[in-house]
Image (cartoon, helix red, strand yellow):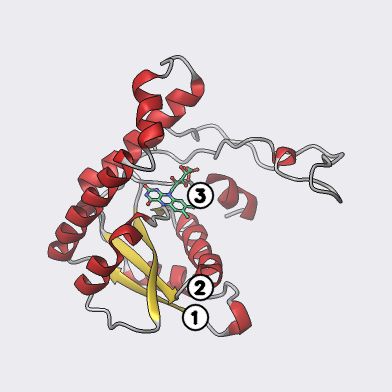
Amino acid sequence: MDLYEAMYTTRSMRRVKPDPIPEDVLGRIFDAAVRGPSGGNRHTFRFLTVTDKATMAKLKTIYHDAYWELQETSYAGVQEKMRDGDPNDPSVQQTKRISSSAEHFVEYLDQHPMLIFVFGKEKGESTTFPVLWNLCLAARAEGLGTFITTLLKLRKKDVEDLLEMPEGFWHMHAMIPIGYPTGRWGMASRQPAHEFVYSEKWDEPVTWEAIPNWEEPEGYGRDHQ
Ligand SMILES: Cc1cc2nc3c(=O)[nH]c(=O)nc-3n(C[C@H](O)[C@H](O)[C@H](O)COP(=O)(O)O)c2cc1C
């Protein structure tokens, strides 16, 4: 798969089929993942894959509670935007789409064929995230959907105990649900890159404009997230 296509279309895929992921596919995507860089090349990362339905059911309860706690606290503004915002406003529509997708996962977490936990040293996310993102890109190349989640950090101890993790060096950094998507791939829509980049001094705009480097072919275009 073309590198740019993978970069433009590795979106959060929360609706997936329950089909298991063959071991040779896992072998390939983890091999690609660990090619990512780590600070001092010390490989301070560790993965744990969960497929056991009883464990997933417990994780679902934990995730559910953490999700709704967040919606009532830090994300209260998002809930308000969806409730009171203009339904024709594209930004309100986008928020509703993401929320509906996120809530789908809350309800169907245990239907995922696999959840991949990522661990590293305390506050060591800068070393685990390059490897983690390589994993998502390699999964994309294999036709597998993923998405990064960090919500369970709100219940870190509960999750680490459930996974029988010893206290000490390792800390949970993220969980990546993975599975074959039910929907189609689509391109990530983002603000133009030149709006994020400045030149020489803090507030000086750049002189160039972003050039989209990949176009959605026929048959692409997300029907849902
Ligand atoms: C660091 C990080 C943490 C995230 N945590 C969660 C999460 O806990 N639950 C979730 O459903 N999505 C999570 N996401 C996914 C984002 O919501 C998603 O990437 C964003 O809405 C853009 O959508 P897209 O990936 O489809 O382009 C996370 C993404 C990142 C990068």
Marks 1 and 2, the one that precedes in the sequence: 1
Q: Is mark 2 within 8 Å of ligand 1?
A: no
Residue beneath disc 3: 10
The nearer-to-camera label among 3 and 2 is 2
Mark 3: amino acid: Thr
Q: Estimate how packed mark 2 is, as few (under 14), some (14 to 19) or many (20 or more) residues with alpha carbons within 10 Å.
A: some
Q: Is mark 3 within 8 Å of ligand 1?
A: yes
Q: Are marks 1 and 3 in contact (CB under 8 Å)?
A: no
Q: Earlier in the sequence, mark 1 or mark 3?
A: 3
Check whether the beta carbons of the residues at disc 1 and disc 2 lie within 8 A of each other.
Answer: yes
Q: Nearer the viewer, residue 40 or 22?
A: 40
Amino acid type, callout 1: Thr
Residue 40 image point, x, y percent: 62, 83
Find residue 140 and report its horizontal and vertical position in percent: 47, 54
What residue sits 37% from the left and 19% below the top?
Answer: 84
Disc 1 packing (10 Å; few <14; some 14–19; many ≥20): some
Which percent across, then down, holds residue 208? Answer: 84, 39
> Which quadrant: the C terminus?
top left
In the picture of the structure, the residue carrying the numbered disc 2 is 124
Residue 224 visible at all: no
Find numbered disc 2 in the image and state the secondary structure of the residue it sits on.
loop
Q: Dot 3, crowdedness within 10 Å: few (<14), some or many (≥20)?
A: many
* Residue in the picture at 80% in, 37% down: 209
Residue under pointer 1: 44
